[in-house]
Amino acid sequence: MHSSFVSAMPRITIALNEKDHRALKLLSLRDKRRLSELIDEAIKIYLTSTGGYGLSISEANSEPTDRGQRPNG
């Protein structure tokens, strides 16, 4: 049952610089948690603190930005 739930989740690939990757890997070893758990937790904290969970399509910026950066102005 668990594996079917995991396979239904969208997957992404991210690129990390060496310093961030090493720090996350060391934290995962220290805390005996999977790297994906740490990243998932960090994303949830960010979405909660920025109000991301409350956004809707109509509130999204209509102008696309490069690589998630905010537009100037």
Image (tube, rainbow, N blue to C red):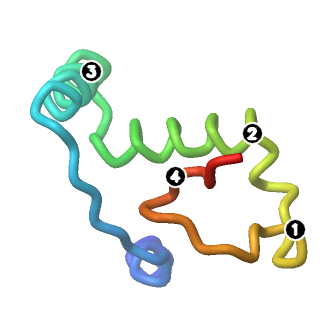
Q: Earlier in the sequence, mark 1 or mark 4?
A: 1
Q: CA distance from mark 3 to mark 1?
A: 36 Å
Comparing labels 3 and 1, the label whose residue is closer to the camera: 1
**Residues at circles 3 and 4 in contact by the CB criterion of under 8 Å:** no
Q: Earlier in the sequence, mark 4 or mark 2?
A: 2
Residue 62, given in percent of the width and then of the height, sits at 75, 76
- Image quarter of residue 65: bottom right
In the shown orientation, is residue 38 left or right of residue 21? right
Amino acid on which the number 1 mark rests in the picture: Glu
Amino acid on which the number 3 mark rests in the picture: Leu
Q: Earlier in the sequence, mark 3 or mark 4?
A: 3
Residue 54, given in percent of the width and then of the height, sits at 87, 56
Residue on which the image places disc 1 = 59
Name the residue located 51 percent from the left edge and 58 percent from the top edge.
Answer: 68
Name the residue located 42 percent from the left edge and 61 percent from the top edge.
Answer: 67
Name the residue located 81 percent from the left edge and 45 percent from the top edge.
Answer: 51
Residue on which the image places disc 2 = 50
**Residues at circles 3 and 1 in contact by the CB criterion of under 8 Å:** no
Residue on which the image places disc 3 = 27
Q: CA distance from mark 1 to mark 4?
A: 17 Å
Amino acid on which the number 4 mark rests in the picture: Gln
- Image quarter of residue 11: bottom left
Residue on which the image places disc 4 = 69
**Residues at circles 3 and 2 in contact by the CB criterion of under 8 Å:** no
Comparing labels 1 and 4, the label whose residue is closer to the camera: 4
In the shown orientation, is residue 15 left or right of residue 71? left
